[in-house]
Image (spheres, rainbow, N blue to C red):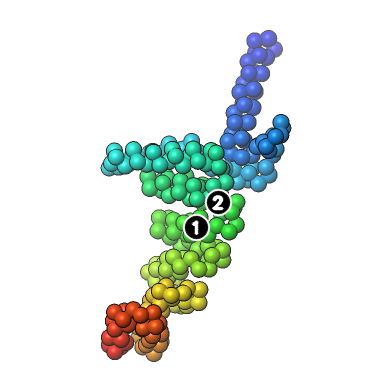
Amino acid sequence: MQKNTIVSVILVVLILLGGLAFWAFNRGVLYFNEGSMFPRFSKVAIMHPVPSLDRTPSYSTDFPAEGRILYETKVTKLKETLTKEPANLEAWLDLAIYYRMVGDHEGAIEIWEYLRTMYPQDSISRHNLGEYYFHTVKDYEKAEIYYEESIAVSPGLESNYTDMYEMYKYVYKQDTTAALDILKRGIEKAAGPSAIQFKIMLGREYRDRGDKENAKKYLTEARDAAQEAGNRSLSNDLTREISAL
């Protein structure tokens, strides 16, 4: 092998190693502890690397110019924050939402899946994944899995119950009691106005199914709770609704 060829091979190898090292540090696979001269290796990060901050948006033709300026300003600021504070959960969640705004679903999902793995107590990333698979992909089985994960982490996050109710009522498991059951679970975990709203939804769901007895039961409970809370307008509306059964 000629000398020039050997040098070329060595240069290619060095470039590849440099690129690999850049990726590893950029994605958290390799990192330095404060005061250490030698990098550490993260086994978790090799399986779930830190999401890339180098994504470039692809705007739709009807995306307004002022919207682009606002988007790029906000995203640049979030990326600066995450470069300094890679464990800033709120900044990651905000960045994922901005990605979603311009249709970068892949970027948003990468962040949510990363947060789901690295932050076991984060329910928002799980809820957002459920919402994505429900409304965008229409993979209802997968959506259900993510919603259930979110409920397991934060039983009081009410939007999980309302989303799952809509999914069960209109597109998934419609020939089961799933829509009724998820509202009952919501009633158990919610408090105040949310609990009242879940009872109203459940009463109306029973009404639509022709079960007047249970419809009256839950609407009456909702009315009484509204009275106790001092919401006279809602109480009167529910009284009229109960009378019409």
> Amino acid type of disc 2?
Leu
Question: What mark, if any, has residue 115 been given in the picture?
Answer: 2
Q: Residues within 10 Å of mark 2 (few under 14, many from 20)?
A: many
* Residue situated in front as seen by the camera: 237 or 3: 237
Badge 1 marks a residue whose secondary structure is: helix
> Quarter of the image holding residue 77?
top left
Residue farthest to the front, as pictured: 230
Residue shown at 69% from the left, 12% from the top? 1
C-alpha gap between disc 1 and disc 2: 9 Å
Does 9 appear above or below 243?
A: above
Where in the figure is residue 245, as x and y percent of width and height?
Answer: 30, 88
User: Farthest residue toward the top?
Assistant: 3
On the question of residue 110 being in view, the answer is: yes
Mark 1 and 2 residues: CB-CB less than 8 Å, in contact? yes
Give the residue drawn at x 39%, y 68%: 166
The earlier-in-sequence mark between 1 and 2 is 2
> How far from the left and from the top, in percent, is residue 116?
56, 54
* Secondary structure of the residue carrying numbered label 2: helix
Q: Residue at x 61, y 23 (%)?
A: 15
Task: Check disc 1 and report the residue beneath it.
Answer: 124
